[in-house]
Image: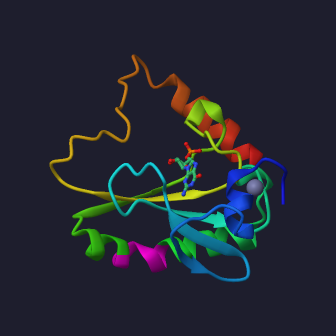
Amino acid sequence: MAEDCIFCKIIEGEVPAYKLYEDELVVSFLDIFPIHPGHALVVPKKHTVDIFDTDEETIKQMMAVAKKLALPVMNGTKAQGINIGMNNKPAAGQEVFHAHMHIIPRYSDDGLKTWSKNLFKDDKHKQELYEVIKKAL
Ligand code: 5GP
Ligand code: ZN
């Protein structure tokens, strides 16, 4: 448990939350400021900051639980789609520094844009970055 971490406090039961699911590795609860009602979070029980310091077994379980929740959340909210995603580091929109995945109900007319695509002038970056990223794997 990390001091002053709101998600650790929820996991420990010190702060209330609408807990949907719990197992040895992860817990899921409703987001307090949902993008749409039914917006849920899947959180590792052991405090980690983001994807980079979360072990693979836990990440796999977070995704397995996101899948388990996807249909109940979608049906329960009468949504037409679901976004599953993770913000890692402030530049990517992370505000709570205890790793978590979002499960967000979506509607075809909700007007939300997950992200917009830029058109780059040339494709030079593709070859360069392809090589840099592939080499680092
Ligand atoms: P981030 O931007 O870090 O990916 O998302 C953090 C999420 O945690 C936000 O969607 C925010 O609404 C949610 N959140 C922040 N504080 C609390 C809290 O005290 N309880 C619950 N249930 N969710 C929280
Ligand atoms: Zn924490």
Q: In front here: 54 or 4?
A: 4
Q: In front here: 65 or 22?
A: 22
Query: Is residue 43 shown above or below 23?
Result: above
Q: What x and y, as percent, mark residue 77? A: 27, 68
Left or right for 82, reference 111: right
- When asked about the image quadrant of residue 24, the answer is bottom right
Query: Is residue 111 shown above or below 26?
Result: above
What is the total number of numbered labels drawn onto the structure image?
0
Find the residue positioned furthest to the bottom: 23
**Which residue does the image show at 67% across and 41% down from the upper left?**
133
Q: How is the image coloured?
A: rainbow
Q: In front here: 118 or 114?
A: 114
Image quadrant occupied by the N terminus? bottom right
Left or right for 11, reference 62: right
Q: What x and y, as percent, mark residue 83? A: 39, 57
Instruction: Inspect the magenta stretch and tell me whether residue 98 lies in it.
Output: no
Left or right for 114, reference 59: left
**Which residue does the image show at 68% across and 57% down from the upper left?**
7
**Which residue does the image show at 72% across and 64% down from the upper left?**
14
Find the residue positioned furthest to the left: 109
Query: Is residue 16 shown above or below 71?
Result: above
Q: In terms of secondary structure, what is the magenta stretch mainly?
A: helix
Instruction: Inspect the magenta stretch and tell me whether residue 68 lies in it.
Output: yes
Q: What x and y, as percent, mark residue 35? A: 37, 48
- When asked about the image quadrant of residue 90, the answer is top right
In the image, the segment drawn in magenta is 67-72
**Which residue does the image show at 70% across and 45% down from the upper left?**
97
Q: What x and y, as percent, mark residue 98? A: 71, 52
